[in-house]
Every structure is written in C-alpha cells, then in structure tokens.
Image (cartoon, grey):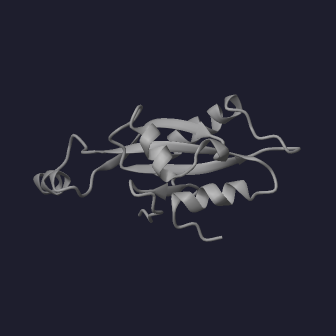
C-alpha cells in the first residue's frame, strides 16, 4: 500500500492482521549555530534548517480519529512542530503493544532522527501529507 496521507496510515494500521501501536516523533526546524548569512535568510523565509526531535507520543489507531484530531492534540505538547515521523509496532496474539513497550522504540526513533537515519519512518507535514526528505 502506498501511504500518501496520515489518514491512510491510520486506515492501514487498522487493517493489519495484528493490532498496531503507532509511534510518532514530532520535529521542529532549527537553524544551526554556525549557519551562514544565506542559510539564515532562507530559514527566515521558511526554508532549510535542521530537523530536531521535540516530542514523541504513541497511540493506538483507535485513539486517533483523523489527522485533524492528531494535529489538535499536538497543540498541547508541541505546537510548533513542522514534521511528524511515524512508525508502528505490531502486537501479538491479538493484543496491541502496551504504551510501556513503545518507550524504547520511541527512544530509538529519536536517536535515529538525530543521526539523520530516517528511511524507516513515514514523514508527514502539517497538512497530514506524506513527504519525501533528502
């Protein structure tokens, strides 16, 4: 399945043979301290910058009705995110993974994003559209 929107991700997660727990890392865009004048100008115009993990959360697909619900919830803990990276954990024997079991994978996601290793995640913009980075 080619997932092009956050809402398609929710649908795909609900259709898996085993229950899923969705993992999200919200990233903000920051300008590095050693940025050039050109980079600073581009950043101020809304382009460039480095993606920095700012918050993470896990949810069962049933806990999110839509991207709009996710975006509204995110306003309470990370209002200025620019990209959300998504992944999922598969359950076993008809049971979804617990939120506690998602903590280590979320920490691994944060570390991977900091290292620029984002190929295993689905990135979405503030409209809920999948985007291609790099």
Seen at 53% across and 57% down, the residue is 6
Query: On the rendered image, what quadrant is the N terminus found in?
Result: bottom right
Residue 62: x and y in percent read: 66, 45
Up/down of 77 relative to 27, above or below:
above
Seen at 32% across and 49% down, the residue is 50
Asked whether residue 115 appears in the rendered view, the answer is: no
109 or 85: which is nearer to us? 85
Residue lying furthest bottom in this view?
2
25 or 4: which is nearer to us? 4
Seen at 77% across and 41% down, the residue is 96
Question: Seen in the image, is 81 located left or right of residue 119?
Answer: left
Residue lying furthest top in this view?
100
Residue 39: x and y in percent read: 18, 54
Residue 114, picture quadrant: top left
Question: Seen in the image, is 92 located left or right of residue 67?
Answer: right
Residue lying furthest right in this view?
93
Residue 109, picture quadrant: top right
Residue 70: x and y in percent read: 49, 45
Query: On the rendered image, what quadrant is the C terminus found in?
Result: bottom left
84 or 41: which is nearer to us? 84
Asked whether residue 100 appears in the rendered view, the answer is: yes
Up/down of 125 relative to 76, above or below:
below
Q: How many marks?
A: 0
Residue 85: x and y in percent read: 50, 50
Seen at 38% across and 53% down, the residue is 126
Up/down of 22 relative to 12, above or below:
above
């Amino acid at each position: 399945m080619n997932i092009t929107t956050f809402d398609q991700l929710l649908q795909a997660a609900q259709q898996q043979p085993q229950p899923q727990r969705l993992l999200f890392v919200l990233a903000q865009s920051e300008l590095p301290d050693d940025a050039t004048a050109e980079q600073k100008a581009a950043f101020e115009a809304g382009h460039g910058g480095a993606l920095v993990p700012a918050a993470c959360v896990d949810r069962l697909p049933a806990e999110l009705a839509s991207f709009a619900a996710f975006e509204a919830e995110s306003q309470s803990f990370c209002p200025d995110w620019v990209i959300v990276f998504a992944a999922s954990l598969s359950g076993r024997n008809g049971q979804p993974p617990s939120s506690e079991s998602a903590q280590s994978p979320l920490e691994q996601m944060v570390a991977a994003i900091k290292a620029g290793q984002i190929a295993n995640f689905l990135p979405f913009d503030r409209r809920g559209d999948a985007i291609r980075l790099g």
